[in-house]
Each structure stands twice: as C-alpha cells, then as structure tokens.
Image (spheres, grey):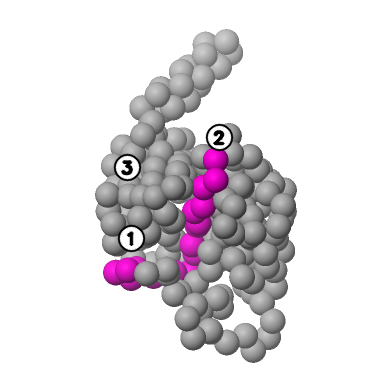
C-alpha cells in the first residue's frame, strides 16, 4: 500500500515538474503547458508567452482561441487556473469563435479582474450581463475560475464558490456589437493591455451534452 501511494505521488510530482497536468475525472486538459498547440492567436501574438506551464498574457490587445476540436462546445464545465498581477485585466470567453481582431463579438466573457482600477467589473462577472463588484480572488495568488453552462443557465465559480448564477430570459436576442446569447462555440483567453499581466494554466473542460 505504501509503495502504491508513493508511486502515485511521484506521478503527480513528475507531471507538475514537466508543466503538464493530470486530468480530473471526465475532464480533458486543453494545453500541454509547453506549446500553443490547439490554440490560435489573433492580433498582437507577441502578447503571449509560456512560463512554468502557464500561458502568460501581457501586451497589446490579443485573444487566443481554442481550435483543438471541430465539435463546438454547448453544455460544459470549464475550469481555468488563473493568477493576476496587480492592476491587471483579462478574460475567459465561451460560446465564441475565432476573429482576426477586436474584442470578441460572439459569446460571453467571464471577467478576470481583481484590482484593475479602470473597470469596476470584477473577477467572475459575466461581463455586462451579471456584473460582480467585489473580487472573490486576490492578485499574485492562483485561483480556479469555473464556468458551467447547462441549457439556458450559466454559473461562474471562483474557488468553487458561486459568484454568478444566470438564467437567460426567454426570447433573448443577440446584441449588435456583442451577441451575449447562449449558443455554441469555443473558448478564448484575453490579453487586455500592456499594463496587465495574467497567467492561465491547467485549462480543462468536461462536456455535459
């Protein structure tokens, strides 16, 4: 028994040191911690780098879209480990699609912002749909941001605590500039501005279709 426990611990340690992550049951890990395989960056690709297994967003506006699967995501549970530097802004998009430039028009943004002074919408907000004004996480500490979509319901959790529980009203229609209606699509991560530094790692998803 002791040998089995030790071996299991060794596997976890080895995965951590190599920058890869062991998937939780039912989840698929969307990054190998070493490359941008499965992801496509639009404008300002220099805003992205990889450090210690994490995607690092720092630089001019840029979005990195998950393109590792053809089948779109409809109902799912997405988990992302995030760490922000002081006064940093970022985002996690879902039900979106690749676009060459600009703020993503399609889908929703789960906000990443613990102390960014120029935007009152804090971490966990369903941006401009259900806004949170008190940060549930801290800068310079890893936290887990979870998005769960089931039918017309969206939950956003920070470290397993629900901060948004939104049910889309019947008859909701896409907006002109940003759709913000539940549909289907992929995920994207945001590099917001040169003064913000946000790290994303251990990105994993479980389909609930």
Q: Which residue is mark 2?
A: 140
Check the image and name the residue furthest to the top: 2
| Position of residue 48 in the picture relative to residue 195 (left or right) | left
Quadrant the C terminus occupies: bottom right
Which numbered dot is residue 49? 3
Which numbered mark, 1 or 2, is in the foreground of this view? 2
- Where is residue 161? Give x, y as percent: 72, 48
User: Quick check: 31 above or below 105?
Assistant: above
Callout 1: few (<14), some (14-19), or many (20+) C-alpha neighbours within 10 Å? some
Q: Residue at x 51, y 19 (%)?
A: 9
Check contact, mark 3 vs mark 1: CB within 8 A: no
- Where is residue 44? Give x, y as percent: 28, 57
Mark 1 or mark 2, earlier in chain: 1
Q: Residue at x 55, y 46 (%)?
A: 87
Q: Residue at x 44, y 47 (%)?
A: 195
Q: Secondary structure at mark 3?
A: strand
Front residue of 105/70: it is 105
């Amino acid at each position: 028994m002791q040998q089995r426990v030790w071996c299991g611990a060794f596997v976890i340690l080895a995965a951590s040191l190599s920058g890869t992550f062991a998937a939780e049951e039912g989840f698929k890990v969307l990054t190998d911690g070493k490359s941008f395989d499965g992801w496509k960056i639009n404008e300002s690709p220099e805003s992205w780098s990889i450090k210690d297994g994490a995607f690092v967003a720092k630089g001019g506006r840029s979005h990195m879209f998950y393109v590792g699967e053809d089948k779109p995501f409809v109902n799912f549970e997405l988990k992302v480990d995030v760490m922000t530097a002081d006064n940093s802004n970022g985002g996690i998009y879902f039900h979106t699609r690749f676009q060459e430039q600009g703020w993503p028009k399609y889908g929703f943004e789960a906000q990443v912002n613990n102390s960014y002074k120029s935007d009152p919408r804090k971490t966990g907000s369903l941006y401009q749909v259900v806004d949170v004004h008190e940060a549930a996480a801290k800068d310079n500490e890893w936290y887990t941001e979870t998005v769960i979509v089931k039918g017309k319901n969206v939950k956003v959790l920070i470290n397993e605590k629900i901060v948004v529980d939104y049910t889309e009203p019947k008859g909701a229609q896409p907006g002109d500039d940003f759709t913000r209606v539940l549909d289907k699509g992929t995920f994207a991560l945001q590099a917001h501005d040169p003064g913000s530094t946000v790290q994303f790692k251990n990105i994993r998803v479980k389909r609930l279709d």
